[in-house]
Image (tube, rainbow, N blue to C red):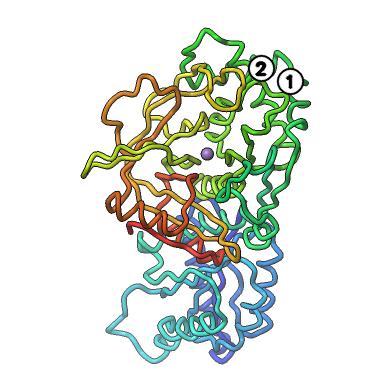
Amino acid sequence: MEKLYFVTGSQLLYGEETLKQVAKDSAEMADYLNAQISGCEIVWKPTVCNSTDAEDIMLQATADRCCIGVIVWMHTFSPAKMWIKGLQALRKPMLHLHTQFGRRLPYESIDMDFMNLHQSAHGDREFGFICTRLGLHREVVAGYYRDEKVIARIQKFADVASAVSFSHRLRVATFGNNMRDVAVTDGDRVESEIRLGWNVNYYGIGDLVDRIAGISPTQIDAKLQEYTEKYLMDTPELDAVRVQAAYEVAIEEFLQAEKLDAFTDTFEDLHGLEQLPGLCVQNLMAKNIGFGPEGDYKTGALMAVLCHMAKNRQGATAFIEDYTYDLTEGNELELAAHMLEVSPVFAKNQPKIQVHPLGIGGKAAPARLVFDGIEGGGIAVSMVDMGDRFRLICAKIALTAQPEPMPHLPVARVMWKILPDFSTGAEAWIRAGGAHHAVVSTSLDVSDIRLFAELMDLELITIGF
Ligand code: MN
């Protein structure tokens, strides 16, 4: 299980008795937080009293592969020069929790001993200064540690820190390369690994085609069973569906063998495949496998990271593409979809498996899921490569019901309103260089993206917040 270290700062000046009390109080706080926070364990660590302690604990956090970050607070005053080497050694996300052991002052009994023991107001400012002086990217949460709002912020930090850890070990396969001549989907893969940890590698589509050829009818039957349990079979062309089933089994095997959590394909390089992967990609996206079409590895990787961040939450998170507008004045709507690959996490109704010809690519008619989209508040997140840095763009959207049925549109679709209004939102997105591919989420909010950008030291532009 992933861990967050709970580290308390003090100093030796206070004497043994006070330090015993500090240890007792901080252990109680760590226990309380551990009971409240889900998805990771909060691990109490002995009080840091000098520079060696600080460096040791931060080196330990950095080396511990299960440790996704540290929570630090100052029970008493802790001279911050002693934290410099430790903070320089720390390579994991840090939450500076500015809180206090007791909620209310004991006005009747308070004396100098009490005040000297409960000095977070004092000690956390000293610690905050050195973090700022060092230019440390971190989260700061202030409030009583038992308050629901504070717990929610710590939970958010735990989710985002887990996504940071996931990002650092994410491996992405691109089957084929970036779509010819397309700019925004391309990017610097070396820089992606340096800045985000993403290990992105090219594979020939033939590597997948070979694997597909080895998939047995029994494996295909099992996959078909999975499809019919989840979706409505709305086609007599079962052979076309079986083709997608074989693709999915092969891709799953490939992902597992190569320890991959995201992949891309491109309709320009489908040699040896009868159909564009459609249904199989849709079903994989619903299992939090990141996907980017047209070789868009950044969107595929970002989707995997954001799905990981949202893994313990309700709602939908997946890749989608900006496609077409309804520009009715005052009620402008965007129709978002893709050629086929829209994740069923966005489905309002039970998705139907259908087979229709595809206008682009010159391949056999592919099986795909068709459905209308969900409604509710959400965000659209795009990552672009600016040449000398990556930029994240996060826009507020409101997913809405489609005003009328679209009986001739043979793909899954989602509709939304760009906020705060069409001109403001769309102009800002265009000016920011936002892509036509994005990850849309109803389970994450802008504060998750802000924190991720802060902890990863990424440029972020927000629109509509
Ligand atoms: Mn596209």
Q: Which residue is mark 1?
A: 215
Is residue 66 in sight in this rendering?
no
Rendered residue at 44%/34% (across/down): 337
| Label 1 residue SS | loop
- Work out which quarter of the rendered image holds the C terminus and state it: bottom left
> Above or below — where is 285 with respect to 436?
above
Q: As shown in the figure, which amino acid type bears the numbered disc 2?
A: Ile
| Residue furthest out toward the left | 330
Where is residue 37? Give x, y as percent.
Answer: 48, 55
Cβ atoms at labels 1 and 2 below 8 Å apart: yes
Rendered residue at 62%/41% (across/down): 179
Q: As shown in the figure, which amino acid type bears the numbered disc 1?
A: Ile
> Above or below — where is 61 with respect to 418?
below
| Label 2 residue SS | helix
Is residue 36 in sight in this rendering?
yes
Where is residue 95? Give x, y as percent.
Answer: 51, 68
Where is residue 290? Give x, y as percent.
Answer: 58, 41
Say whether residue 202 is left or right of residue 437.
right
Rendered residue at 43%/45% (across/down): 441
User: Which one is nearer the viewer's eye here, 54 or 43?
Assistant: 54
User: Which one is nearer the viewer's eye here, 208 or 289?
Assistant: 208
Question: How far is the residue under mark 1 from the one under mark 2?
Answer: 7 Å
| Residue furthest out toward the top | 236
Q: Which mark is residue 220?
A: 2
Is label 1 within 8 A of ligand 1 (CB to nearest ligand atom)?
Answer: no
User: Which one is nearer the viewer's eye here, 43 or 453?
Assistant: 453
Q: Which mark is residue 462?
A: none
User: Which one is nearer the viewer's eye here, 275 or 19?
Assistant: 275
| Residue furthest out toward the front | 181
